[in-house]
Amino acid sequence: MKGHTVPASDKELVRIEGVHKFYGSHHVLRGIDMTVKQGEVAVLIGPSGSGKSTLLRCVNHLESISAGRIRVNDELIGYRERGGKLHELHVKEIARQRRNIGMVFQRFNLFGHKTALENVMEAPIQVKGKDKSSTKRRALELLDRVGLSERAYHYPAQLSGGQQQRVAIARALAMDPELMLFDEPTSALDPELVGDVLNVMKDLARSGMTMVVVTHEIGFAREVGDTLTFMDGGVVVESGNPRDVIANPQHQRTQGFLSKVL
C-alpha cells in the first residue's frame, strides 16, 4: 500500500462535470466527469490524443471548455454563471484563480537568464508581492526539498533536464498551491533522470498535496495514486483503485493499452 502520511480527506477539491471541448469540429473531450478529494493523487493514463493533457489544461483554464463545469475548492474555474449561462472571467480573475493551482509541464519553461533560485523566487515576488528576504529563504527551502540546494545559483543551461524539472516543481510550490497539476512531467527526460523527479512527486504525495498527474509511469500510478483513470477518445473508459485497474482491467481498451506499456 502506498504511504500517505497525511490521509486524503472527504472534501472534494476538484469537481469536473460534463466537460466537453471542441477545437473547431474536433471533439477532444466528450463529457468528462471526475472528482478529486483533498490530499488525493489522481493519475490519468491513456494513449496520445486521448484528451488527458487537454483536460488537465482545462482545470486551470489554460484551455477554455465548450460545455460543462469545473470547480476547484467550490469555485467555478474560468467562468461565472448567470442564468444558467457561462461568462468567461476577466484575465485578472483567471490569474487570481491560477495562483492556487500549480502546474508542471513536460517542458520546464524556466527563465534561462535567471538562476534556479531566481526562477523559484520570481512568482511570489511579482505576483504575490512578497518581500525578497523571506521569499529567498522559502525558495532555498524548496530547492533543498527537491534535492537541489547545491544548485541554487546555477542557470538552467548548467542543469540536467531532471534538475530543471525539479526546479520547475519548486517554482510551482513557491506559490503555496492547494492543487498541483503535472502534465507528463517525465516524458521529456532521459530514463536515468526520471527517478529523481518521481521521488520528489512521491514526497509531495506523502505530505498530503492534492495532485492530478498525467503520466505514462505505470509504476508511479500503482505506488502513489489513489485513483487511476484511463482515457481514450476523449472519454473516461475506466477508473478505480490503481492496483485494481492495473492488475485486472475491466475494459478491452484498457487491457490493450496496459499490455503495451507494462
Image: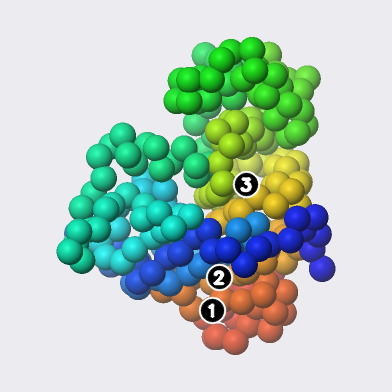
Q: Which mark is residue 186?
A: 3
Choose top left, top right, bottom left or bottom right for residue 17: bottom left
With 151 as the anchor, is 69 left or right in this view?
A: left
Of helix, strand and loop, which one carries label 1?
strand
Q: Of callouts 2 and 1, which one flags the residue occurring earlier in the amino acid sequence? A: 2
Separation (CA) of disc 3 from disc 2: 18 Å
Look at the picture and state if 232 lies above or below 13: below
Image quadrant occupied by the N terminus? bottom right
Separation (CA) of disc 1 from disc 3: 23 Å
Of helix, strand and loop, which one carries label 2?
strand
**Image coloring type:** rainbow
| Nearer the observer, 76 or 144 | 76
Residue 62 visible in rendering: yes
| Nearer the observer, 66 or 197 | 66
Whether the residues at callouts 3 and 2 have beta carbons within 8 Å, the answer is no
Whether the residues at callouts 1 and 3 have beta carbons within 8 Å, the answer is no
Which is more foreground, mark 3 or mark 2? 2
Image spot of residue 86 (x, y percent): 22, 58
Image spot of residue 118 (x, y percent): 58, 17
Q: The residue under label 1 is which amino acid type?
A: Glu
Q: Residue at x 27, y 53 (%)?
A: 80
Please name the residue that numbered disc 1 is placed on.
238
Q: Residue at x 61, y 54 (%)?
A: 210
